[in-house]
Amino acid sequence: PNLLKQTLQNKIVSKQKEMKDLRQTHSNYKIGDITIGSLLGGMRGNSLMYWDGTTLSPTEGIKFKGLTIEQCQDKLPNAKDVFGNISNNNNGKFFLPESMLWLLITGEIPTREQTLSVINLLNNILRQQNGELPPVTETIMNKLPADMHPMTQLSIGITSLSSQSKFSSLYSQGKLGKSEYWSSTFDDSMKLIANLPLLAGKIYSRLHQKKTGPQPLGSINYEMDWAYNISSMLGMTKDSQNIKGLTPKQQSDFVELMRLYTGIHVDHEGGNVSAHSTHLVGSTLADPFLSYSSGINGLAGPLHGLAAQEVVRFLFNLQKKLEKQQQKSNDALGDTDAAITKEIWRLLSNQQVIPGYGHAVLRIFDPRFDAMLNFVKQRPKEFQNDKHVNLMQNLSQIVPDILIKHGKCKNPYPNVDAASGILFYHYGITELMFFTVIFGCSRAIGPLTQLIWDRILGLPIERPKSIDMTTLKSMTK
Ligand code: NMX
Ligand code: MLT
């Protein structure tokens, strides 16, 4: 039995009624004004779309169904709750993305059994595929140039899964009434999420082709969770080739990092580009694969998810420069802060953005950044000699003051991408271009759960009006 789908089904009637009442009674209620400034400023500050899973407060950060990250860590089942004591490394403490999937779809905190049912739901999809990508996708992926950007490969891979879409197939046969859209959208969405460890693994193994050949770097363990299986497919667990030569503790820590990362990146309210694109394309009744691949295309921009790769490039360049300067002047470390400050000012005066800093909505240190930083602080021995991780921490203390003095950027604090890439690098994922693929695995969960609800609630095709310069000018006369 599909516990998640059944539980969702039980929620449909009351939620549809809520929406109908709102539409009928309050359609004319005004929730904001649109100014020319916001129209030309990326619609900042305008509430223009319906999104139910998460909300984003400028001063508190992300909330998942009203729960902060800390509250989620406290309340949602983690690997220890689900599997018992699986490691002697005190790991298994971060909530599982499967718990979050249950929370976002049903609005309820799952029990251990409900979380396990989601793990089994995703693994059973992969069992039916013999733990391999569908043949069409496998063939397409193998034909892509190995050096094609991993995000382009991910987008193509997800798009190609569209040939598996139950929704599209039933729709094109004229077999679907509007009230039935949600069910095959649910099945497609679960299929997409289940396939992401395989797709990420495929793309990563192709980056390694020269060293390891085209074989998979690991295999799916049907007894384990989704984040564990992403780690395996990247070659980082005992179910894999352990290509980076990690110690058992490091393997366990890497899986823990993956659970943390993929748990907290699932969603960031509806307006971020990846969620918004998925919603917009989905509103045409494009299937979940086509809808989410457009989200991936948005995530691949350097002002959005690709910042994760840009941050690491930036850290490496900066570290090199600092070392060169130190060699030249035989300076003690004390002058490092001054050198960093100088370099940040140089970039700003060259009109470059400091990657990993700033945010369209947040006005605080991103709580997701804090969560990643806590991961480091909980493992002082592991990270004490990693100069890039130390630099990342150092920057987070120096850059905000500079950005405040610079006076342009509305949020001078580190965002989620400031810390993540360099932590993956630490454990051996040294291919910078790959980082955003892991972001793309996680982000599927929020926008796809919303897409299922969009179908349940019968939201229409999204089609705002645009305004030209002549009209704007005539309005202001
Ligand atoms: N470094 C330098 N300048 C910046 C930065 C930054 N980190 N952030 C914003 N600004 C500039 C921005 O370019 C704009 O300049 P101009 O007026 O010349 O166009 C000005 O400050 C005002 O921008 P804001 O209103 O503060 O920011 P906005 O909402 O437009 O953009 C970001 C938000 C996140 C796109 C922007 O802060 C940025 O480009 N940050 C660096 C890239 C980054 O880290 N992106 C990742 C975001 C998280 N994610 O995963 O998606
Ligand atoms: C995200 O997680 O999507 C980013 O922080 C960007 C955003 O919220 O706009």
Image (spheres, rainbow, N blue to C red):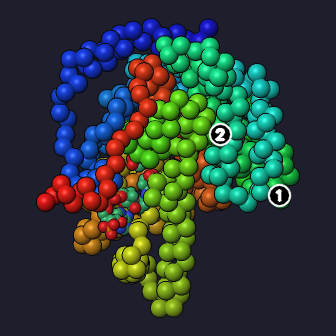
Q: Quadrant of residue 221?
A: top right
Q: Quadrant of the C terminus?
A: bottom left
269 on left or right of 183: left
* Marks 1 and 2, how far apart at CA: 26 Å
**Residue hosting label 1:** 211
- Residue drawn at (18%, 54%) of the image: 475
Q: Is residue 95 visible from the viewing direction of this image?
A: no
- Residue drawn at (41%, 28%) of the image: 460
**Residue lying furthest bottom:** 329
Q: Is mark 1 within 8 Å of ligand 1?
A: no
Q: Quadrant of residue 60?
A: top left
Q: Quadrant of the N terminus?
A: top right
Q: From this view, report whether residue 185 is shown above or below residue 272.
A: above
Viewer-side residue, 287 vs 319: 287
Q: Position of residue 360 (x, y in %)?
A: 33, 53
Dot 1 lies on which element? helix
**Residue hosting label 2:** 158
Q: From this view, report whether residue 143 is shown above or below residue 9.
A: below
Q: Position of residue 355 (x, y in %)?
A: 44, 64
Viewer-side residue, 143 vs 190: 143
